[in-house]
Amino acid sequence: MEKKAEWQWEISAQRPWFRFNLRELFQYKDLLFRFVRRDIIASYQQTILGPVWVFLQPLFTTFVYFVIFHRVAKLSTDGIPPLLFYLPGIIIWSYYADCISTTMNTFQYNAYIFNKVYFPRLIVPLSSVLFHSFRISIQLLLFLVVCLFYFVKGTPIYLNLQLLLIPFLILLTACFALGCGLIISVLTAKYRDLDNIMQFLLRLFMFAAPVVYPASLIPQKYAIFFWLNPLTPIIEIFRSSILKPHPLPLGYLLLSVLTTGIILMTGVILFNKREIQIMDVI
Amino acid sequence: MAKKLLEAKDISKYYRLGALGSRSFKEDLRDWWTGRNTRFKETESESPQHIWALQNVNFEVTQGEVLGLIGKNGAGKSTLLKIISRITLPTTGRICGNGRIASLLEVGTGFHGELTGRENIYLNGHIMGMKKKEIERKFDEIIDFSGVSRFLDTPVKRYSSGMYVRLAFAVAAHLDPEILIIDEVLAVGDAEFQMKCLDKIKSISREDGKTILFVSHNIQTLRNTCNRALVLDKGRIIASGDSESVLAGYMHKSGEQFLGTDYTLQTVMPGNEMIRMRKVELIPGYLNDSRVIDVRTELRIEFEFEYDVEEPGQILALLQVYNDSGELIFELSSQNYHLRRGIVRGESLIPGNFLNDGLYYVSIAIVRNSVVRLFYLESCLSFHVEDYKNSRDGYGKWAGVVRPAFPISLRQEPE
């Protein structure tokens, strides 16, 4: 019998629950960035406006929401100029929705690669999130430009230090979306019914976050459930970063970090455990 | 003793067949309820719904050897490769290994049509596990090998299929793993490029001392490249050892007579842009009902291909007959024909009382203007010539490569 130490690696029937090989993931960082690059190049291939679409999408959406929710439905914007009110919600929400809807289909979309070659599968959902992060960073620039525009125009807005929190808020959104996406990707791999339900739930979920209305509109007795949604403090803090300095809902933010952490952990562990077995049923 | 690089112990793989739907969901629920593990039902024998793709497979790979893996369709070759490549998990057993493994179960995995050749070299290289620096170092070599340097900045979706495969194989050929796993990816591209690929594989193993695991249907190719071979049948290893004896045994045992195929029934007809083989067939003129090819049997070879070259030119067909040990016994060449594009039929006749008993295979080449080899279909036929003895023949195997029945007579000279 040989000693175990003789071998560098081993493949066996069962995968342990907590086998998270960070070093291996790091070895594949070149692949991670190459995937991001591929997505960026491929998505603007043969378009005339190219990356300009990254700006246009949120602007169009803002316009539609402005008409429907502000003008027609007369929902309050908490006294913030409508463009500045809708933009943060739309940016964060579309980032979340994009991340989740690509990561939740990781196995289905990439089966043709996964069936032919091994690499840590986590690279793929990570690269999708990074790709959307590239888009959201451009959209943030757009947001700043709009802010400056209002600032110059003399609208009472304050560019306070809270703005520095925004990268952190985006990271938090990314982790939350990645966690959810990983969990759903594992659950929907075998039976795709769940996939259809998820599409529907995702659409509903938008209305559970303060995207088209302010959090202040929620009746006090439901507020606690509303704020349990990690996206609520994220959007609210983002939105208020251009207002007069005021106390942050730090408690809720902490709760959001905690929830996100648990979901992300669950997602990564589940994904790692099942990533190879899923290939037999995909 | 050479260092062991890979060791597989008791590998089995169990598959559930059939569509996944409400029925399999019910089964899953039941298994979950009764606490049974769906992936492992040792007690249950093979049923129409379940199959053991591999059963108790054990083998080792030592450094520097080229191990061939052969078996019929469905023998479990691909499953085994997938397990070694960590694409799927074994149901039982384990594989231990040293060093980096690169598997070529396909060339050009992850190629993206919208990206340029240059981008795809990096993308594919990274997917195969190469680092950025490694690719940069070998970039010129890769381009050189692929021969598509002019199209480097064109999206690969505009490539011809031949160029695509060249580029893809070029990346693969420059991987630098300790163990290289190759599935039958070489049945692509034109003959010249196929030869280049095989040569590359040989040089990888001989000059760089790399360890290779090679899967193919093609006995001739395996014979030329491997020094050890495994035969898989219905998920079990039924023979292993040095490639010469194992492969010869495989052909004899399975009777591996291969009297022809109608390629038009297959998804892909072998060939390239200019030639597509439609059919190759060997029709023995059996002498009696036993339907055995023996030394007296006349053998007719028929083949049919699509010819698609616009410019006028002449083509000829070349038939090569090899024996068991890969020696070329003889070569037949047709005369040059002026042919238009369309379907071309050819036939030839090997007379009875010519070949000695043994195993033979036939390769066909189509040559243009006497020098340009358009396509080469290696070992597309194989047949076994049985011995035939009549009373005056004596015992033992006839010596010699051929066994013609030229007259030979003796005469008593007057004293």
Image: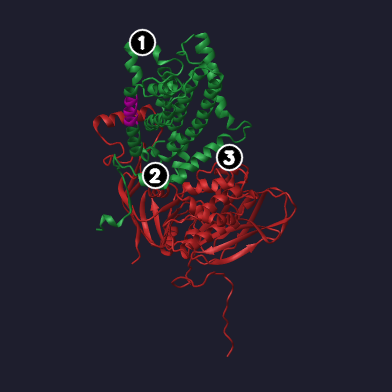
Residue A188's place in the image compared with A223, above or below, is: below
Disc 2 to disc 3, C-alpha distance: 27 Å
Residue type, label 2: Leu
Whether residues under marks 3 and 1 lie with C-beta atoms below 8 angstroms apart, the answer is no
- The quadrant of the image that shows the N terminus of chain A is bottom left
Q: Which residue is mark 2?
A: A25
Res B413 → quadrant: bottom right
Q: Is residue B199 visible?
A: yes
To which chain does the residue with label 2 belong? A
Mainly helix, strand or loop, the magenta region? Answer: helix
Whether residues under marks 2 and 3 lie with C-beta atoms below 8 angstroms apart, the answer is no
Q: Which residue is mark 1?
A: A219
Q: Which chain is green?
A: A
Q: What colour is chain B?
A: red
Is B387 in front, or is B208?
A: B208
Q: Residue furthest bottom?
A: B415
Residue type, label 3: Glu
Expressed as whole percent of the image width and height from the top left, the position of residue B62 reads: 37, 61
Residue at (49% x, 8% y) in the render? A74
Specify start and end residues of the magenta stretch as a single range: A253-263
